[in-house]
Image: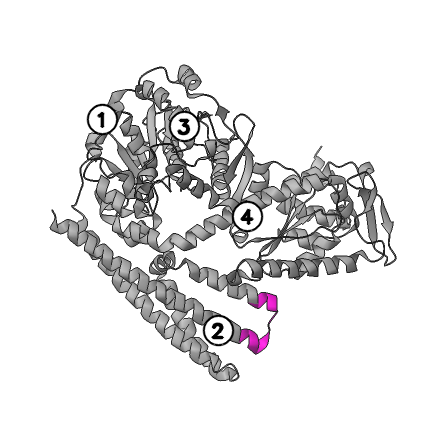
Amino acid sequence: MDTAQFSVKLPRITEPQTPFVSNMRALWEKWPMLAQEIDLVDERDLIECQQTRSDNLTCRLPGPTGEPVWLHSRYDPRREAQRWAQGAIEQAEKQQDEQDEESSRIPMCYFADGFGLGYHIEALFKKLTGEAFIVVSERNLPLVRTALTRLDYSEMLESGRVIIITGTEREEIFKKLQPRATMMMMGVAFTHSLQRVDTEFHSEVHKFVAEYASFMRSHLISLLANCLITCKNIMYNLPTYVGTSSIGILNNRFKGSPAVIVSAGPSLKRNLTMLKEIRDKVVVIAVQTTLKPLLAEGIVPDFVTSLDYHEVSKRFFEGIDDLRDVHLVAEPKATWHVIDYCRPIGPVSLLHNEFAQLVLRGMNDEHEGLTAGATVAHLSFYLAEYIGADPIIFVGQDLSFTDNVYYSPGNALHEVWKGELNRFCTIEMKEWERIVRNRNMLREVEDIQEQKIYTDEQMFTYLQQFEKDFARCPAHIIDATEGGVRKQNCRTMSLKETAAQYCVEPIDKSKFDYRKKINKFKTGDFELCREILQKRVEEAEEMKEICLETIELVREMLTLVDKQKELNRKMVRLDELRTKVKRRKEIYQLVMFVSQGAEMYRFRQDRTIELDDLEGKERQRRQLKRDVGYVTEIKNGCDRLLTLLKDGIERFDKEIDNE
């Protein structure tokens, strides 16, 4: 029998559009893990709600001492939420004004402790503009499900601009915040809660959000402050970038071999004797500050890393006349003083760099890169991963003020301080000054003995990065520092215990024969490089001319806001100039490398225009003024880039003349 002719068409079942269905559909799209957690909540655990005089809902939960606390007003919770949201905005504006006039009214992230029935979150959400978002701490999933069952927040949830934190695991919190990391660079406004319920949980989440925001803020400040000197170093290092070999030959070369990363923390002195004993059984990667102390102890590292932009770093290498057995691996942004000093006396490899690649556009760039490191210790860790080391062992990585000092004895920075030392100014006093200088950023952490110890905000951000790196690394990570802050996602052991378990066989010396292949400095492409840089000069000059015409045009348009027909005619030429810029995207990218403040300026101005809710001609005026400032900064960037390019040409000319 042909069953096809007897097929039955079943009626389509349409799901009722209840608030819960709408909310969950939005959650499944944006936050599927949270949607799953809420879906598993038993309906019998939902929170009992009561009708208010304004015909809304409220509910209560046990407070800190067990007493019942109403989460919202019993009269008019929506009005209460509106007042709270307005207060949160005003508080954020005042807070930003006090911190930094330049960043006033900029916060893009608002933290609220407690979701409640969602009234206050929705009220704040409706007041925010652009990409501003809210982070909410709330682990009471029955409460969240109650809110989503009774009230429709689907529009708010669909935006993806409300992040609900339900646990206190740092990695999970950071993972949720990471997509909005750039926005968090602009600062976070921490609001006052409506009611005090589950305060310990909210405080814990508050702390982690503040830590992440601090990390991103520090990254932003560093980026803005150092962008020009960074680009100068890269430009000055171009001859070495072109004339030396990539690190590609190192990929998995030491697979399965133990590597020790030597940092300059106070605990380093405890491990030098043991490190000397196991020297031939480990690959030694030294951060630049430890190179001289290690050599003084008769320990010749296999690698030394450098990425610091400041020329003081040259002090860490001065006086050394032979590095043939020490391979310098550096980021091109490292000060050119170090690269120039080391290149004649030992093997040097610079990592892949986007700015260098854009400048040398047209050449074949075979340089391989590593993850960008916040410090030389991070860079050393990424190098250890790249060479295939396992385990990766840390010594001298205190990340805290072990024994109330910052650096290990004999550190190269102590040499830098020598000129300032006398009977009234000792090494100990200089160490103490280094700590006290950051007294406002000190914080207590646990050391490896679970005792309280101090670190500062900067080192704490480095710790967070290490812990994230350790969590994803497939190799065994061992903290053999024997001092300093306790680190997550790694084993804590003494170097002696580590050596007995992992450092048994000598490293095969033939694995270091590659140095003979990469030690030759190649100058064959220098004439071509010089021609390419001259081409970049011409492109930058063209971009500058476009900027100058644009600035003049926009200033003229400012006088024509009340004459819209004439303004529109000028707009045609402005669009033509924008098209010219788009066609020159590579040189535009180079300009923006040396004009990081341009995008920041534009962002601030756009944010202020949004918050002022301007319309019509006044909005036009503000936008045109913004464009004048923005394009002026790009023009200034062209001037900076032209100076750097001409300096780069001189560097190649010098190398060609010295051949």
> What SS does tag 3 mark?
strand
- Vertical placement of residue 557 versus 385, above or below: below
Q: Real-space Cα distance between discs 1 and 2?
A: 62 Å
Magenta span dominant secondary structure: helix
Mark 3, residue position: 395
Residue 223 lies, with reference to residue 636, above or below; the image says above
| Residue drawn at point x = 54 percent, y = 53 percent | 183
Q: Earlier in the sequence, mark 1 or mark 3?
A: 3
The residue sitting at 75% across, 57% down in the picture is: 81
Label 1 crowd (10 A; few <14 / some 14-19 / many >=20): few
Question: Which residue is nearer to you in this view: 402 or 316?
Answer: 402
Identified at 26% across, 62% down, the residue is: 537
Q: Quadrant of residue 576?
A: bottom left
> Which residue is label 1 attached to?
513
- Mark 3 is on which residue type? Val
Provide residue 284's location: percent of width, then percent of height: 33, 27
Residue 265: say if magenta: no
Q: CA distance from mark 1 to mark 3?
A: 27 Å
Mark 1 vs 4, N-terminal side = 4
Measured Cα–Cα span from mark 2 to mark 3: 56 Å
Q: Dot 3 surroundings within 10 Å: few (below 14), some, or many (20 or more)?
A: many
The residue labelled by disc 4 is 213
Query: Badge 2: how crowded within 10 Å, few (<14), some, or many (20+)?
Result: some
Q: Amino acid at mark 4?
A: Ala
Ranked by sequence position, the earlier of labels 2 and 3 is 3
The answer to whether mark 1 and mark 2 are in CB contact below 8 A is: no
| Dot 4: element | helix
Specify the amino acid type for callout 1.
Asp
Q: Earlier in the sequence, mark 4 or mark 3?
A: 4
Depth check, mark 1 against mark 3: the one in front is 3
Distance from Cα at disc 4 to Cα at disc 2: 32 Å
Judging by the rendered image, the residue that carries numbered circle 2 is 624
